[in-house]
């Protein structure tokens, strides 16, 4: 990658994009089908004591269907062994989180057909609390509160402190991205491969930077042609974001393509629970592990970061 091709200072993505992509580069002009979508959950475990602080992961991406809901739902599912988990679905166009968790269709359709009335909180079989923020109402952000711990109204359990919250939010929700400034433990940007995927992901990084002031984001490359391609994609994004935005982009992992996975997850639930040995599930669990590692520098002594021991039945 040759960065010494111009003496003028770069101002826009166009000023640097030609440094990274050529017409003949593998995958540069092709975008594989994003065939990964999620659904439900499995067992849950949590300490009886409340957390010192809720770790909040914000998952977003560009307008090219990069798979942010897939990543958000499976991240929430994969965090279940580590504590109490909630997912906030803040997409007003297509609130996929409920649908991907295998909840009844009226939960999925109510934000679209119910006049903007949020659907009630629901707990999946795995114990993930699913909260509807798709209406876009400002009041929904009240759940964030002002302290370091986020509490949720859990059916049959009442007000409950959350160890982890995952927010599935599109770039259009600038109000929410701004509200999450200073609260998020990590911002995760989903990206598709190719030139267009690179451009959409860069826009997402730029929006996160402008709305939250974050100087670091994590990148997940969805359905790349190979691991090597994904790492090269990240290296190019890291260089562009550092040069133009002063943002550090960390590589969180990849989600490999698995044909038919979308339909399977809609029927059986999140892939990390329904098919834990699948390559896609292994990758998504690794992404969750890396996301936790991003928060280990928070200086929380004694906080559990390893899953509880489980015995095979």
Image (tube, rainbow, N blue to C red):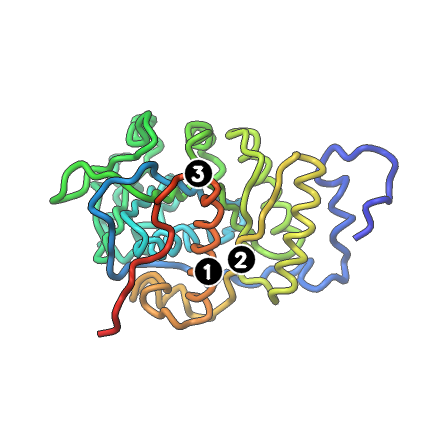
- Calculate the distance from the C-alpha at mark 2 to the C-alpha at mark 1: 7 Å
Q: Position of residue 15 (x, y in %)?
A: 77, 39
Q: Label 1: how many residues lie within 10 Å, few (<14), some (14-19) or many (20+)?
A: some
Q: Residue at x 28, y 41 (%)?
A: 162
Return the disc, 2 or 1, that comes first in the chain's sequence: 2
| The disc label shown at residue 278, or none | none
Instruction: Give above or below for 149 relative to 268.
Output: above
Label 1 residue SS: helix
Q: Residue at x 39, y 72 (%)?
A: 277
- Outermost residue toward the bottom? 313
Nearest to the eye among marks 2 and 3: give it: 3
- Outermost residue toward the front? 301
- Calculate the distance from the C-alpha at mark 1 to the C-alpha at mark 3: 22 Å
| The disc label shown at residue 286, or none | 1
Return the disc, 2 or 3, that comes first in the chain's sequence: 2
* Nearer to me, 243 or 190: 243
Residue 204 position by quadrant: top right
Instruction: Give above or below for 37 relative to 9.
Output: below
Label 3 residue SS: loop
Q: Residue at x 50, y 51 (%)?
A: 65
Q: Which residue is mark 3?
A: 299
CB-based contact (under 8 Å), mark 2 and mark 1: yes
Q: Position of residue 82 (x, y in %)?
A: 32, 53
Q: Position of residue 130 (x, y in %)?
A: 27, 46
Residue 135 position by quadrant: top left
Q: Which residue is mark 2?
A: 253
Return the disc, 1 or 3, that comes first in the chain's sequence: 1
Residue 25 position by quadrant: bottom right
């Amino acid at each position: 990658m040759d960065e010494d091709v111009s003496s003028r200072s770069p101002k826009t993505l166009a000023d640097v994009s030609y440094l990274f992509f050529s017409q003949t580069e593998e995958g540069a002009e092709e975008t594989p089908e994003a065939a990964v979508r999620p659904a439900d959950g499995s067992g849950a475990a949590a300490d009886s004591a409340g957390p010192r602080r809720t770790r909040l992961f914000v998952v977003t991406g560009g307008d090219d269907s990069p798979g942010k809901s897939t990543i958000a739902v499976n991240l929430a599912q994969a965090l279940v062994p580590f504590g109490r988990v909630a997912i906030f679905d803040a997409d007003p166009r297509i609130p996929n989180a409920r649908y991907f968790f295998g909840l009844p269709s009226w939960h999925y359709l109510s934000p679209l057909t119910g006049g903007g009335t949020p659907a009630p909180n629901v707990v999946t079989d795995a114990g993930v609390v699913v909260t509807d923020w798709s209406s876009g109402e400002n009041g929904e952000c009240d759940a964030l509160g002002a302290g370091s711990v986020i509490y949720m109204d859990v059916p049959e359990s009442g007000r409950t402190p959350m160890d982890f919250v995952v927010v599935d939010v599109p770039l259009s929700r600038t109000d929410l991205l701004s509200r999450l400034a200073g609260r998020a433990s990590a911002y995760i940007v989903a990206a598709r491969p190719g030139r267009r995927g690179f451009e959409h992901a860069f826009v997402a990084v730029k929006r996160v930077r402008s709305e939250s002031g974050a100087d670091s984001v994590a990148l997940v490359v969805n359905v790349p042609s190979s691991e090597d391609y994904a790492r090269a994609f990240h290296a190019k994004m890291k260089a562009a974001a550092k040069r133009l935005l002063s943002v550090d982009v960390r590589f969180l992992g990849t989600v490999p393509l698995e044909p038919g996975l979308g339909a399977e997850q809609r029927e059986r639930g999140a892939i990390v629970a329904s098919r834990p040995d699948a390559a896609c599930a292994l990758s998504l669990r690794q992404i969750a592990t890396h996301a936790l590692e991003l928060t280990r520098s928070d200086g929380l002594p004694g906080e559990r970061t390893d899953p509880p021991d489980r015995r095979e039945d």
